[in-house]
Amino acid sequence: MGSTTNAEKNNQPKSKGAQQLRAENASLHARLRRAHIFNVIAAVVSLVLVVVVVAQQQSSGSADTSASASTATTVLADQYARADADDPRAVGSIDAPVTIIEWTDLRCPYCASYTNETLPTIISDYVNTGKVRIEFHDVAMFGDQSVAAAVAARAAGEQGMYVEYVEALFAAAPETGHPDLPREKLVGFAEQIGVPDMATFTAALDRTDLTDAVNSETSESQGYGITGVPFFIVGDTTLSGAQSVTTFTNTIDAQLANVGA
């Protein structure tokens, strides 16, 4: 009893060997599956890395191109110009060789001095001869009336009379201090210069889009570091304050010489 026959003895090792083989095969298949999964993941990671590198190279190339383009733009005024041929707050040809950017507040006594004494010469000698373009920007620094005056000038500009309006307003400015500019005066300047549609002009004084545009441009200008007016960029040169006619003409002539005009 309890004895094992020779046949049973012979069969046991064979049975154990088959089980072991099946186990080994199962283990091998598991390792192969894990290796396959790892290889797939590695391939995906490699592909992602290639895409990232290519994108970085393209981005670097674009940045280099942008930097080159930025370096090529050497005229300071061009960086602040609106450069719109239909701009109602600009005078002069869009193709003029020199651009002047002017920041002004319509209640500023120094802005009035410049406009009354210097601007007419610049317009007659340089703007009207196609040499200079002037673009005007708002800096409403002296309260709500400064904002209201800038809105009124923009409203006149929509009817093609921005410069005429600014000139009339500054011509009436006191020699010192900030003028009082209530609504009736703003309407009076429009009547004085002959704005064609007074009803449209008067309605525009209450337009929120014009008020928002003045406030936005004021904030933008102050963001540039402009804390005093009038302030000018003449081509590549900056001028601050109500400089003399001679200073302006010398500066403009130098800029024209730089561009070969």
Image (cartoon, rainbow, N blue to C red):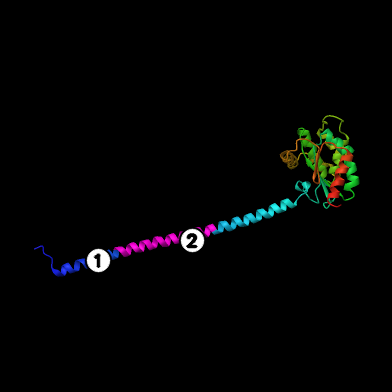
Report if residue 158 is visible in the image. no
Q: Which residue is mark 1?
A: 17
- The mark found on residue 142 in the picture is none
Q: Residue at x 66, y 53 (%)?
A: 63
Q: Residue at x 32, y 63 (%)?
A: 26
Q: Which residue is mark 2?
A: 43
Residue 122 horizontal/vertical position (percent): 88, 44
> Is-magenta flag for residue 215?
no
User: Looking at the image, which residue sits at the far bottom?
Assistant: 7
> Is-magenta flag for residue 24?
yes
Report if residue 153 is visible in the image. yes
Tell me the distance, in whole angstroms, between the alpha carbons under discs 1 and 2: 38 Å
Q: Residue at x 59, y 57 (%)?
A: 55
Check disc 1 and report its element: helix, strand or loop.
helix
Residue 27 horizontal/vertical position (percent): 33, 62
**Quick one: label 2, few (<14), some, or many (20+) residues within 10 Å?**
few
Amino acid at the residue labelled 2? Ala
Q: Nearer the viewer, residue 50 or 104?
A: 50
Which stretch appears magenta? 23-49
Check disc 2 and report its element: helix, strand or loop.
helix
Amino acid at the residue labelled 1? Gly
Image quadrant where residue 61 sits: bottom right
